[in-house]
Amino acid sequence: MGRYVARRLLQMIPVFIGSTLLVFAMMYALPGDPVRALAGEQTVDPAQIAQMKKDLGLDLPLWHQYVNYLGNLFQGDFGTQIASGRPVADIITDAFPITIRLALFAFTFTVLVGISIGIFAGLKADTLRDRGLLVLTLLLISIPSFVLGYLLQYVFAFEMGWVEPNVSEEAPAGELILPAVVLGSLSLAYVARLTRTSVAENLRSDYMRTAVAKGLPRRRIVGVHLMRNSLIPVVTFLGTDLGALLGGAVVTEGIFNVKGVGNAVFDALRHREGSTVVGIVTLIVVVYLVASLIVDLLYAVLDPRIRYA
Amino acid sequence: MRGAKSAKWVAGAIVVALSATACGGSDSGDSDAKEKGKPAGYVSIDVGEPQKPLNPADTNESLGSYVIQSLFTQLLDFDSKGGIVYTNAESVETKDSKTWTVKLKPGWKFHNGEDVTAKSYVDAWNWYANTKNKMQNAPWYSDIKGFKDVHPEKGEPTKDVMSGLKVVDDTTFTIELDKPVPYFNYKLGYATWAPLPKAFYADPKAFGQKPIGNGPYQFEKWNHKKLIQVKAFDGYKGPNKAANKGVLFKNYATVEAAYQDLISGNLDMIRQVGPKDLPKYKQDLGDRAIDQEYAAIQSLNPAFYSKTFKDIDPKVLQGLSMAIDRKTITKTVLNGTRTPATSFTPVGVQGNQQLDTDIFTYDPKKAKQLVKEGGGVPGNKLTIQYNADGGHKEWITAVCESIRNATGVDCVPDAKPDFQTDLEARDNDQVKGFYRGGWVADYPLNVNFMRELYDTKAESNNGRFSDKDIDAMFRKGDNAKSLDESIKFYQDAEKALLKKMPAIPLWQYRINGGHSKAVDNVKVDFHGDFEITGVTAK
């Protein structure tokens, strides 16, 4: 187990370097010069631009810039934004906490509601209740998040007046619920469907029949025997989903004015702030790696037949 | 049977969804929700994160300018008609348009109590102009004698100060220019000409995060990407003293989000209503909606080095201009957010004139004829380059449609993914046909809309238009003895431009914004910016 974890952690290093290099190269390949663009349509001064590029190290070849970047990164320096002159680390510490909270809300919502719906439907597969829930999840899957976002915002903020339409600067928990629901609703539908199918299938399996025949209480049959086996595909999905949620959903963050990671990445991309994009993407990659490691470890807990040497 | 039941579910859900969206006409504009975190007497406006630190000479985009303008006051400013209003200056005078004498109003102070003196200005300008300090707006100082010493075209500066700037006494200084510029005082209204306190030079970087100005407001806090807060400066002596207690510049992720907050009472002023809400904002806001022209113009600029427009007969361009149905496009596609152009300069700048011409009027027959007389467009096909991230696609498509229908010339939109890519193609002379041009007034004179755009040597002349006669007419305007004469010469030049067609002006911008019930006296200046100092909180 310990060796397995260590090996997985070591594997992260090449993935980390590879992904940063890839993003770095992509940013480099994008047309558009961030320093030049500062002037917009107004007067451009070539001497000035050359001076700025030299100071920022942007006149160096790609590999040199990348080596410089990695070198600084290992000293804990994420670089500096070209336009604002702010350290990228500040931008990250501004954006990540709020997105983490939003993602955790959305994740909790997805897990609790999604799995409950799934079990609820799966236990009585092919009944009206099951069909109804399937249609509901189908609806959630097919509605684009911006439609759902504006719809919920309209209904709950303007018609009912229960919440503010936008998340304010401090982003208190109450304001994050609505965007979290929108953000989580797509994965909710997938989780519900995965759970439902898995539960419905396992209900017919031999060990379930045995458990029933042994006369175990229903709570134990469903809660332990059925759930443990049915959750494996769901946990796989949830693992990658957590990464996606943390990556931030640009659309949802835009609708509810959440100043999170999605917003920050979009902004940085638009302004060709390479170091900011690479910094944030790197962190998201790390989150994905850790999440998938946790998922793999959870397998062993859920199914004791799976063992790590 | 089961199928039928689930179908009912779907139908039910659709009815719920539709009824929720269909019952429009929200009355939520009446809500008087108190805005969170806003001190009493403050007003709020949606202004996004400034691109750069708050340094007057390093900002030329509108978001940063809003904040800079509230914190700093220059020598002079302009009224709604484009006339000069002296703010920090008592007078700015010249006899020969070459040497200008500035007298400051006495008793002005920076927000930290330091006196605003002639030296505060001269030192600041010298610092701004220096190449080493990498200020975006350094070229603004290029008229001043000795600019080349501090800002050579290549290499390091040889001096620290410009020889043209001289402090006479505490409240007087003189500016000597390289050559006469009759409208030089108009340039002084641009935000970059602000003075700096001594505290600046100790740590310019920290200053950019926490500026100390001499303007109507003093800096309070900057929560990056969220909010900038300033409060009214009690010691301010200018004519534009704040009528409110302070301002919150709030950053929204989208214009739609800002609009939502405006109608739910969490925001006082919105600068631009997004396309989604444009059709209904007047209904939502009533007399609180703002719909007004400002001094900015959009045009199609031919790249004169391209295959399409190399050695083109201006007649063709005139014909193409007449092939564009400006009236219909501004009304429908652009939702009335623009006014059809009638000249190369926008209404509201001094020297704007009614040109006696039909070149800006839609006339498909004459358009076709003119294009034919001029020898047509090579390959009978042209392109319009634009940036896809700026909401231009719809009108570019409409313009192309209009050109195609009227003249039979095939017109293809040439989308660049974003503004940066668009600019890069322009800088590197890679535009294949037209590019989408736009210009907002730096100062309210017709000069600003010709000299900076169509002079052979102008930096922003990305179409590389070059014409000796036009250059000579501009020079004549620059060397005129008085401002009026200069404007007059430029008006003549504008008439000559009609025959050369360096660009096809399309329309003038309008500001489509609004304000909440919590504020009054909301006015817009020639830049299309709100005059925040005059806004009163109810």
Image (cartoon, coloured by chain):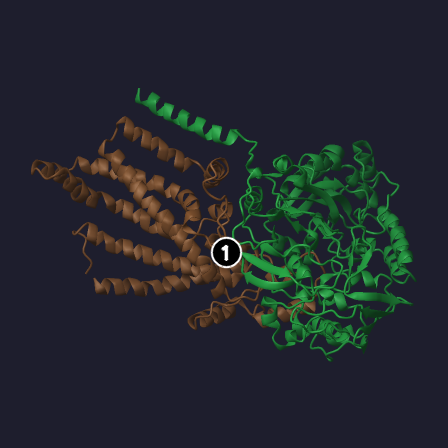
In the picture provided, is B496 more to the left or to the right than A160? right
Quadrant position of residue B76:
bottom right
Q: Residue furthest left?
A: A214
**Chain A: colour as depicted:** brown
Q: Position of residue A251 (x, y in %)?
A: 49, 46
Classify mark 1: helix, strand or loop: helix
Q: Chain of mark 1?
A: A
Seen in the picture, residue B235 relative to B531 is either above or below; the reply is below
Asked if one can make out residue B46 in the rendered structure from this viewpoint, the answer is no
Q: Who's green, chain-wise?
A: B
Q: Quadrant of residue A187?
A: top left
Q: Nearer the viewer, residue B525 or A226?
A: B525
Q: Is residue B483 above or below residue A126?
A: below
Residue B302 lies, in percent from the top left, at 75, 49
What's the residue at 39%, 37% (across, down)? A141
| Residue visible at 66% across and 65% down in the picture | B58
Q: Which residue is mark 1?
A: A264
Residue B467 percent coordinates (x, y): 84, 55
The reply to whether residue B505 is in sight is yes
